[in-house]
Amino acid sequence: MLPVNSVLGAVLAALLVAAAGVAAVARLTGPGGRSHARAVGTAGLRAAVQLAAVSYVIGWVVRAVPLLLGFLLLMYAVAVWTAGRRVTGNRTWWWAALPIGAGVLPVVAALLLTGLVPVRGIALIPVTGILIGGALSATVLAGRRALDELASRHGEVEAGMALGLLDREARLEIARPAASDALLPGLDQTRTVGLVTLPGAFVGMLLGGASPVMAGAVQLFVLVALMAVQAVAVALVLELVARGRLHRGGGPGRPAGEVA
């Protein structure tokens, strides 16, 4: 659909500069007041390098099952690291492995056991990548929102405990609504598919020569599978935060969400 030439490179560079420029002019900042302008530029450059490398690597790993499994594990490890460090800066980040793995693994296993997806890299890598990406996004959103809410409403948590609620129950009451918001992007995408947007799987199938019916079936599967993966991820992140396993404190004795 797009020619890979100097024109494409120039357009991409202009769009990246525009995105970073808008972030700088609008003073869009992240945690700690750091400007997102530099983050936008860095993310774009990283994406270019990583996609170029992955394009060559995938052609190599699809030739053998051990290489394929190794590549999938690498995808999972990077997702865990990224999600965990986005949620917290301390050693509890590795708990992000649980919601991502518990959401993705059962779905991938079901697809393989039913034969809907063959054990071939050309099919397994993109499907697993979509699911891991969805779990990553849900984990980050749920974890950050839950911990932010607990930090800003810590007094309400203590009030609930004073009324007789257990630590976990008091934190759940405060964190659950905020963490649940992580499901909204996936829900909105599913509700408006075909009316507002035509997602990548649908367009890719059409460009690959599939019929509109087949493309629609594949896209429906992707959306429903993503909702299942993200629901599991959000539920587990909420539980980890409520139990104090995933926190921003200086140690396990600090309340979940309390900043050191």
Image (spheres, rainbow, N blue to C red):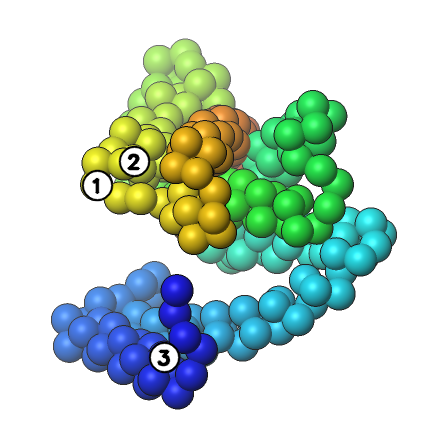
Residue 68, percent across and down? 76, 53
Q: Which residue is the extreme one toward the top?
A: 164
Closer-to-camera residue (60/145):
60
When the figure is inspected, residue 24 is found, relative to residue 210, above or below; the finding is below
- Mark 3: amino acid: Leu
Cα separation, mark 2 vs mark 3, equals 28 Å
The tag earlier along the polypeptide, 1 or 3, is: 3
Q: Residues at badges 2 and 1 in contact (C-beta under 8 Å)?
A: yes
**208 in relation to 41, above or below:** above
- Mark 3, Cα crowd under 10 Å, few <14 / some 14-19 / many 20+, is few
Callout count? 3
Q: What residue type is disc 2 on?
A: Val
Answer with left or right where residue 253 lies relative to residue 141: right
Look at mark 1 in the image and give the residue it sits on: 196
Amino acid residing under circle 1: Val
> Residue 200: x, y in percent?
40, 49
Can residue 105 be seen? no
Q: Quadrant of residue 29?
A: bottom left
In the displayed structure, 163 sits above or below 246; it is: above
Q: Where residue 194 sits: x, y (%)?
A: 27, 36
Secondary structure beneath dot 2 equals: loop
Q: Going 36% across and 79% down the picture, which residue do you hit?
A: 8
**Residue at 60%, 35% in the rendered image:** 104
Crowding around mark 1 (Cα neighbors within 10 Å: few <14, some 14 to 19, many 20+) is: few
Label placed on residue 8: 3
- State whether residue 112 appears in this view: yes
Q: In this view, does 190 lie to the left or right of 69?
A: left
The residue that mark 2 highlights is: 193
